[in-house]
Amino acid sequence: MAQATMKRPAPPAIRQTKLLINNQWVDPVEGGSFDTYNPATGQVIAKVAAASAKDVDKAVQAARKALESSPWKTMDAADRGRLLYKLADLVEKEADELARMESLNAGKTINDSLADMQGVVNTLRYYAGWADKIEGRTVPVRGNFLSYTLRQPVGVVGQIIPWNFPLLMLAWKWGPALACGNTVVLKPAEQTPLTALRLGELAIEAGFPPGVVNILNGMGETTGAALVAHPDVDKIAFTGHVDTAKIIQKAAADTLKRVTFELGGKSPNVIFADADMEQAVAGAFHAIYFHGGQCCTAGSRLFVEDKIHQEFVERLAERAKERKIGDPLDPQTEQGPQVSKEQMDKILHYCDLGQKEGATLMTGGHRFGDKGFFVEPTIFDNVKDDMAIAKDEIFGPVVSVLPFKKVEEVIDRANRTYYGLAAAVWTRDIDKAHLFAREVKAGTVWVNCYHVVDATTPFGGFKMSGQGRENGEAALEHYTEIKTVTIKLK
Ligand code: NAI
Ligand code: MG
């Protein structure tokens, strides 16, 4: 593992740290704040305003008022789309600065942050196009009646997002919510509060009316929980840990809010002996180490057919040893820090546990350097299905290699998990590819590729990886209520 060295672009200026309520930047009622860090150094970069339940109430009231009055309520659907297009244009114009801010605060490599900004633009434009195409139907009912359906906004939506793709998750949440005419109270992750605030400024500049988007930073257990409990919030959309989703679902039961969840995974990545070896090694590497493994779809269970197992693991380990780790703002860097000390410690705990469980540590297993929150790319070989490193979401650069012999066997083992977010198969045999795609219980299946996610295709989980779908037309269903109108005819 080498230290990257090229010259880095300057870190961006931090302009905004307050709460956004009703298009005003305000201090919290009770004056709370928290520190946000640069995970590459562990140093504080800014103090950010933290919302209490009182601020949540103010934001929800603003969102409710915007939902039920002009100009948002009466705006032509096409004009809602134009606001989203405008926001996408502003993000595109500011992409470099936004990407640098994302890298500074989240530890993403600058190249990954730039790719995220393109994803944000694509998502906002995709949903901008939907705004005036969300239609009801006329329904052939029995009797002399005319029945038709209206698709109306769900209402005030609380959106709680994580730190691994801060702005992309914002776009996945705002895009469909706003295209459908909802209003939003967003709570970014406490680790990465900064880029969302810049988006708030851009949303005002784009012309979104007061109260349509509100942004409240703060802790999950306080700000997030207050949003979930608020009786005037109609829906919660959440991305994060499965245990947090359980807490949210229980709390949401009191007001019977709608909930959609995108949770993690322990995604199986299956390599058959007939795959293109070079491509499969590169693909398996990308599957686990993209963004230091901090990816809900990470290919963390790597099933490799017995016949090629040894060569495959050796080639993977060679690549891991060459990975350039370092300053995320340096364009040569391939892997930045983990987002926080908490995450680094969790990953290092699993590195120890894997060895205690008897798996073979091929490479990595330690912290990289002594400042910031870096972890070496790590490979455990000869992992058994019942080891914790094969079952738990580690959310770091740690892959468990599991040898297999037969197609039926690997499908069965791939499905032995509570999760079901993504899966991949590498083979030149079309029968194996289709069989695996049909039988694996996962919301996304890749064949001879990995991490290909697009604004246009539904994304979400089977089993405990989630409820509902984001992206594509599928997301619109979760941001509209269907109303049936029946008229008696003469
Ligand atoms: P988390 O689920 O605690 O945090 C995600 C978001 O939920 C944050 O905005 C947080 O403030 C909020 N939150 C936390 N507790 C809440 C509560 N009681 N009520 C309302 N909102 C609440 O995840 P965390 O602690 O950041 O990471 C822990 C693990 O979760 C990771 O190691 C990883 O395994 C998983 N994770 C999965 C993600 C995914 O993309 N599916 C993203 C981030 C984390
Ligand atoms: Mg948490």
Image (cartoon, rainbow, N blue to C red):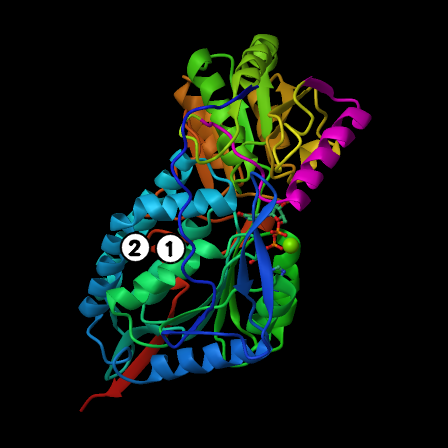
Check residue 171 in the rendering and tell me which mark sits there, or answer none. Answer: 1
> Is residue 204 rendered to the left or right of residue 382?
left
Q: Which residues are magenta?
A: 333-362
The image's mark for residue 96 is none
In the picture, which quadrant includes the C terminus?
A: bottom left
Is residue 276 visible to the viewer in this orientation of the structure?
no
Nearest the viewer among 485 and 102 is 102
Residue at the limit of the structure toward the bottom, as seen here: 490
Q: Is residue 376 above or below residue 76?
A: above
Which x, y percent locates residue 402? 65, 22
Q: What x and y, as percent, mark residue 186?
A: 46, 65
Q: Marks 1 and 2, how far apart in space? A: 6 Å
Confirm or reject: label 2 Cβ below 8 Å from ligand 1.
Answer: no
Residue 228 percent location from the top left of the image: 57, 71
Q: Quadrant of residue 434?
A: top left
Which residue corresponds to the image point at 45% horizontal and 35% vertical from the top-left? Answer: 109
User: Which residue corresponds to mark 2?
Assistant: 124
Residue at x 49%, y 81% (from the top left corner)? 58
Residue 29 appears in the picture as rendered: yes
Residue type of the residue flagged with mark 2:
Leu
Quadrant containing ligand 1: bottom right
Say if mark 1 contacts mark 2, CB within 8 Å: yes
Q: Residue at x 64, y 40 (%)?
A: 393
Please rate how many residues cluster around mark 2, counting C-alpha atoms within 10 Å: few if below 14, some from 14 to 19, many from 20: many
Left or right placement of residue 390 versus residue 312 in this view? right
Helix, strand or loop at label 2? It is helix
Label 1 amino acid?
Ala
Q: Is residue 346 magenta?
A: yes
Quadrant in which the N terminus is drawn: top right
Q: Residues within 10 Å of mark 1 (few under 14, many from 20)?
A: many
